[in-house]
Amino acid sequence: MSLLTVSTVAELREFVQQAKFKGLSVGFVPTMGNLHAGHMSLIKHAKKHCDVVVASIFVNPLQFNDESDLTSYPRTLEQDQALLTDNGCHLLFAPTVAEMYPNGQESQTLVSVPDISIGLCGGSRPGHFDGVATVVSKLFNMVQADKAFFGEKDFQQLAVIRKMVQDMCIPIEIMGVATERSSDNDTAGLALSSRNGYLSPEELTRAPVLYATLKEVAAAIQQGNDTLSTLENAQARLTQKGFKVDYLTLCRQSDLKPVTADDTQLVVLVAAFLGKARLIDNLPFPLNRTND
């Protein structure tokens, strides 16, 4: 099956309208390109749940608060097209900045999702989630898919998008897909990410410590250990391994608020620099609370 690549909203809508006229369901996977096995997992889930799969590649300038990060973000369109073709994607929407923001970024209406965007990555990257919510809402309106698929590695991003869809009554079902991890001996457990390409070979062998630390934290809290000391000890271990920790924290899964005595569905989240790469990861886990 060949992949159709389009760059305009008009071409995209014509394709989707023809699919819906035939009674076919449409799944959507938005990406910024530089695709890897994690993205292909989203494509496979979309194929499983929908008749037609649309992917997008757009490096969204609105969600970058560092111009050098935007400039250096890897663009690998031909390689991405080959991967999408091999994994059965039907259409790739690859718009220009001018197509996405025809009136300029400065005059673009912004979508802001309050509360859940604050703190964590939102605290470290001011304006980031306004950029994410704005571009995703535009893409949802452009594609008009039945379901959209997002990786759980970006846990806060997924929560922001779920709330945006709910608050704005957007008629699309958001499907979270479990984080795809490396199975190679040297990097086992490392969450797959385009930013892993910034790691040196030596840093790559250290990077799996991030996920191992999350598992240790979850196990310790499930065993009843003090949360604060558990997180402090874990952060100290990461620092000792050469990570510069941005945050390491425990939240409840539903809204990323601080954990209360009644919460049982928790998630430990981390963001840390290793060399030039800012890595994020998380581990959702249940907590069985018993009455004394």
Image: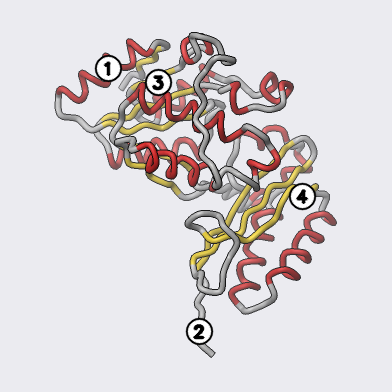
Answer yes or no: do the residues labelled 4 and 3 have beta carbons within 8 Å? no
Q: Is 176 left, or right, of 62 in this rendering?
A: left
Q: Which residue is mark 2?
A: 290
Disc 3 versus disc 2: nearer the observer: 2
Q: Residues within 10 Å of mark 1 (few under 14, many from 20)?
A: some
Whether residue 205 is visible to the viewer of this picture, yes or no, is no
Q: Nearer the viewer, mark 4 or mark 2?
A: 2
Q: Alpha carbon of mark 1 to alpha carbon of mark 3: how far?
A: 11 Å
- Front one among 10 and 111: 111
Estimate the spatial distance between the alpha carbons at disc 1 and disc 4, rounded to whole Å.
45 Å
Gap in angstroms between the C-alphas marked 1 and 2? 54 Å
The percent position of residue 254, horizontal first and vertical second, equals 47, 57
Q: Secondary structure at mark 1?
A: helix
Closer to the eye: label 4 or 3: 4
Q: CA distance from mark 4 to mark 2?
A: 33 Å
As drawn, 224 above or below 236: below
Q: Are marks 3 and 2 in contact (CB under 8 Å)?
A: no
Q: Residue at x 56, y 23 (%)?
A: 60
Question: Which residue matches tag 3?
Answer: 92
Residue 245, numbered label: 4
Q: Residues within 10 Å of mark 2 (few under 14, many from 20)?
A: few
Q: What amino acid is found at the position of numbered circle 1 in the picture?
A: Phe
* Residue highlighted by disc 1: 15
